[in-house]
Amino acid sequence: MDNIFIKEEIIKQLVTYSFKEEKTRLSSDALTLCTKLVHYFIMEAIDRSRFQSENEEVNVIDIEQFEKILPQLLLDF
């Protein structure tokens, strides 16, 4: 599942959207780090949702499994 590709440009837009001053910049190293962090967050969410569905003996991962793992996932990150 490591083949998920997240475009750095999307992360850049999301991060810079919250900047209050136009002079604030995001370095390329910081952008790369943010992109990797989002990637790992998504991979962890998928993995935990899969474990949750296995524990419930459900063959499909849907929003219900994701909602159950989300509070702890947010606390862990």
Image (spheres, grey):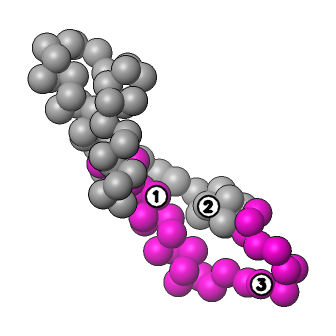
Q: Amino acid at mark 1?
A: Val
**Total tally of numbered discs in the picture:** 3
Residue behind mark 1: 38
Label 1 to label 2, Cα distance in Å? 8 Å
Say which mark, if any, is on residue 11.
Answer: 2
Whole-percent x and y of residue 23?
84, 86
Query: For mark 3, what is the residue?
Result: 24
In which image quadrant can residue 30 be found?
bottom right
Which residues fall within the magenta stretch? 16-44
Q: Earlier in the sequence, mark 1 or mark 2?
A: 2
Check residue 28 for magenta coloring.
yes
Instruction: Tell me: 11 left or right of 36.
Output: right
Q: Residue at x 50, y 64 (%)?
A: 35
Question: What is the CA distance from the residue labelled 2 to the residue labelled 3?
Answer: 16 Å
Give, as a three-letter code, the residue at label 2: Ile
* Label 3 residue SS: loop
